[in-house]
Image (cartoon, helix red, strand yellow):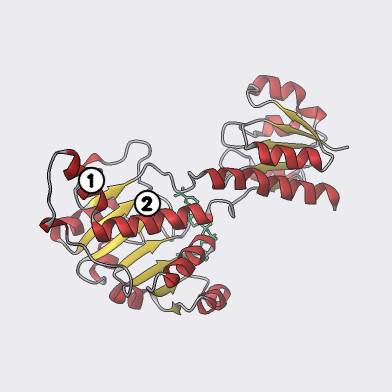
Amino acid sequence: MAKVIICDPIHEDGVKMLRDAGLDVTLDTEVTAEELLKKISEYDAMVIRSRTKVTKELLDAAPSLKAIARAGVGLDNVDLPYAKEKGIEVFNSPEAPCNAVAELVLGMMFNMARMISEADAGMKQGKWEKKKLTGFEIQGKTLGIIGFGRIGYTLGKKAKCLGMRVLAFDVAMDRVKQYIEEIGAEAVDLDTLYAQSNFITVHVPLLPQTKHMINKEAIAKMRNGVHLINAARGGVIDEAALKEALDSGKVKGAALDVFEEEPKPDEELVCRSNVICTPHIGAGSVEAQIGNSTVVAEKLIKFFNS
Ligand code: NAD
């Protein structure tokens, strides 16, 4: 029976799945790095989140380890090249937060369109600013999605159901075109997306090619009064260029879940009335947390059964 150590807290549903599948599971979610180093040799697999650091030293102390399962997306805490060299499989669960992120982005769009945060803040100060708060409807508006992977697709599908026109651009257009067409969206080049969208949202990874892809030049190609959203990674939008565009009114509003500096983002950006912000909570739903644990449990079970 394969032995699995769960080193960081994950939702109980995933733990139950592993046990029901007959794996010998040890829950040790407060294990220190020193303790883990001593006991890791007993285990065939480990489940982690971001707390546990899977270093070269730890991997050298783990002769039986065959799989590492990260409940979540980021793998910065795992020495991936060394795990690969040792033939250890590494799993994560990028599928789990898709819906949570897509719903947050929709919430941000509704919020910007109807000024919900501003209205709420005014009410709490005893104001009744009915006239100032005439918004607009998102039905019939155009949403530009840059990066049509898991989240871009999930969001696009929902936006179509809300009666939006959806334009999509992806660097791997050949791979994603069928999904764009499947939901009734339109595959376009970036310049078309910039020129025609009322809302533009980025769903790309942060890479050298995507760092500051939304910069001064890109913003200049957008419609006047565009609304921008970033729930991907801080740095995809150039915050200095965004502030300038918010000042000039070129960008009417922005909604940001991620920032160039976390957890201390630029106050001058965050505190603007035409910006709504959330502290990197895209994946912060109960369902996504359950998903993180069950998705990696499923992958581990499949691995040990094959
Ligand atoms: P994914 O890998 O499924 O999709 C990313 C897409 O971006 C791919 O289709 C890829 O071809 C495309 N892409 C890459 N470079 C591009 C470029 N230069 N121009 C256009 N398209 C490009 O990823 P996903 O699961 O959809 O996640 C998207 C982003 O959301 C990632 O940055 C991820 O880290 C982030 N994310 C944020 C949160 C949050 O809490 N806010 C949660 C989960 C994921």
Q: Secondary structure at mark 2?
A: loop
Image point (76%, 23%), residue name? 39
Amino acid found under the numbered disc labelled 1: Asp
Image point (33%, 76%), residue name? 191
Residue contact between numbered discs 2 and 1, judged by CB atoms under 8 Å: no
Residue reaching furthest to the right:
1
Q: Residues within 10 Å of mark 2 (few under 14, many from 20)?
A: some
Q: Is 80 positioned to the left or the right of 173 in the image?
A: right
The answer, for residue 60, to whether it is visible in the render is yes
Q: Is residue 170 above or below residue 129?
A: below
Give the quarter of the image for residue 137: bottom left
Position of residue 1 measured from the top left corner of the image (x, y, whole percent): 88, 37
Q: Is residue 226 above or below residue 288?
A: below
Image point (49%, 47%), residue name? 283
State the residue position of label 1: 120
Position of residue 199 measured from the top left corner of the image (x, y, whole percent): 31, 66
User: Does the beta carbon of the residue at mark 2 sit less than 8 Å from ligand 1?
Assistant: no
Q: Secondary structure at mark 1?
A: helix
Amino acid found under the numbered disc labelled 2: Gly
State the residue position of label 2: 235
Checking the image for residue 57, the label placed there is none
Please name whichever residue, 204 or 274, is drawn nearer the observer in this view of the structure: 274
Image point (25%, 44%), residue name? 270
Disc nearest the viewer among 2 and 1: 1
Position of residue 71 measured from the top left corner of the image (x, y, whole percent): 62, 42
Q: Residues within 10 Å of mark 1 (few under 14, many from 20)?
A: few
